[in-house]
Amino acid sequence: MTEMHIPVLIVGGGGAGLTASMLLSTYGVDSLLISRSPHTSRLPKAHVLNQRTMEIFTEVGVADAIYERGTPPENMKATAWYAGLSGDHANYGRELGRLEVWGGGYTDPDYIAASACRTTNLPQIRLEPVLKEHAELLGRSEIRFNHELLSLEQDGEGVTARILDRASEEEYSVRADYLLGADGGHVVGAAVGIEMSGPRDIMKLVSVHMGADLSQWLGDDEVLIRWLVNPNFGGSWASGILVPMGPDHWGPKSEEWVFHMQYATDDPDAMQEEKVLERMRATLGIADFSPKIFRISAWVMEGVIADRFRDGRVFLLGDAAHRHPPTGGLGLNSAVHDAYNLVWKLVAVLRGQAGDGLLDTYEAERKPVDQHNIDNAIANAMNHYKIDEALGLSPDKSADENWAELRPLWDDLPASRDKRHALNCAIGSQTIEFRHHNVEFGYTYSSAAVVDDGSDPYIPLDPVRLYEPSTKPGHPLPHAWVEREGERLPLGTLVHGDYFLLIAGEDGNAWVEAAEKLAAEHNLPLRAVRVGVLDSDYVDVRCAWLKNREITSTGAVLVRPDRYIAFRSMEAVDDPKAVLTGTLNQILSTDLTEGAA
């Protein structure tokens, strides 16, 4: 049996695995990715890609291709609720209400101020081939689909994996320094004795991926997700959810769609294709509806998380580490963010620049965030029932009674003002899902890789909806446009290439000099710049950095390669080199000496 040696073995070819592969290649580290499946996902699955994710994809060079294939911003400004789609009642298809989603097509000032990257939408069935192609083009990672992990053993020096080439039926061995389990929880976690806990069987949904022209029934070009609250079927929000899949057109002219329907977890009809299609036709109200069916899949919502994210030299990320409802679009994004948090730490250890303790901060930082995402996703799913409550719809009422409940929304009746406002409040509460900016973008880290500066604890104005830029250690680097030699760029891109970034104020030359000496002496990937409105290395042309930096002109912040603030000094210090040495020793779990590397 042949054996190969590789620094990192990645098991799983979905969003987490492919992102890890691209990042390792970008940072100059070889890897091997294997996937048991012979192809990328055949299911639409996740589709919303948030700002943090698109920043990461920008760093590895694949963002432009995703934006090109994804939903145009004008077609993903809102989500809306409708009284079904079509049928014999005069009010079928009428809009009940709408809400902006994830920055309203990059028109929300908070989203524009937060990042140079806008949220986009590209179903996983179309995203994964783009990621796979780009991972292969980067040239440092070998991608092998249709290769299955049979077993793994680890020791103090590495991991030995036995792998089956399913096409040739030949087995081979891989010796890796580290193994990343991104296989959706199928093999790796169980192989190292890691279990998952949390609520299961939250609800069952059936998804129908189909090709159909629905443009004659649909308007509202700006609506991304349509919630079809059909009064004939009790009006539940989960009676029909319609999501466009493109690929060439979006909005009402989308060529493909996914239609989600809720079922009881023990309903046998969910497993019978004809009954599923019969219910879909009835819910849509189109009796002769005969779309092209690509795939029907039944799946159960759950909210589980791995008891541990690390076992020796094995790490879990993505669905192998956590699985939760799709509401809010946090699953795929969390997987990408897992990879981004872990890979720079692995690279630092592989280069001999950091100690093993740095790798322990992966779980310390990501597990609380992933658990928070699970909790929010479950809350999002349950919160949709407020729409039903505000409308007064119920499966226990007749169709006529349910339609009567909707009349005050459209006709001026004594109950109209109260009904309309109740619905307005219920829809407004959905901002926990569609404007959860602090959950998807502004989450913070606390670990040994973050040096506490003793400032007051962060108490958010709203822990879900409002991202508040800050340079407090553990927070993401605030976005600012800066210029040098007439070229404008986002400040955060200065970490691209796996760099630490020391940002000093206009009068922070001592910090910059100290950082440059440390980088030279210890061969550290550390850049140092002064950013300010006046005399500085990078000019803060819109004063966005001045607004959010929270340091004086003599202070400094140290930004990690994943664009998180690791250290902050409000002002100058007597010995900046000694302070930075101690800071990096803590972050990197190492002991930098005064001698040159």
Image (cartoon, rainbow, N blue to C red):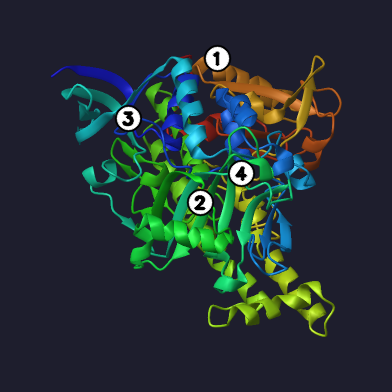
Disc 3 on helix, strand or loop? loop
- Identify the mark at residue 38; answer none if there is no mark: 3
Q: Are marks 1 and 3 in contact (CB under 8 Å)?
A: no
Circle 1 is placed at which residue position? 520
Amino acid carrying mark 4 in the image: Asp
Amino acid carrying mark 3 in the image: Pro
The residue sitting at the front extreme is: 288
Query: In x, y percent, where is residue 574?
Result: 67, 32
Amino acid carrying mark 2 in the image: Val
Mark 2 to mark 1: distance in Å?
35 Å
Disc 2 on helix, strand or loop? helix
Can you say which quadrant of the picture contains the C terminus?
Answer: top left
Amino acid carrying mark 1 in the image: Ala
- Identify the mark at residue 355; answer none if there is no mark: none
Identify the residue at horizontal 77%, vertical 36% (top origin): 545
Badge 3: how crowded within 10 Å, few (<14), some, or many (20+)? Answer: some
Badge 4: how crowded within 10 Å, few (<14), some, or many (20+)? Answer: some
Q: Are marks 1 and 4 in contact (CB under 8 Å)?
A: no
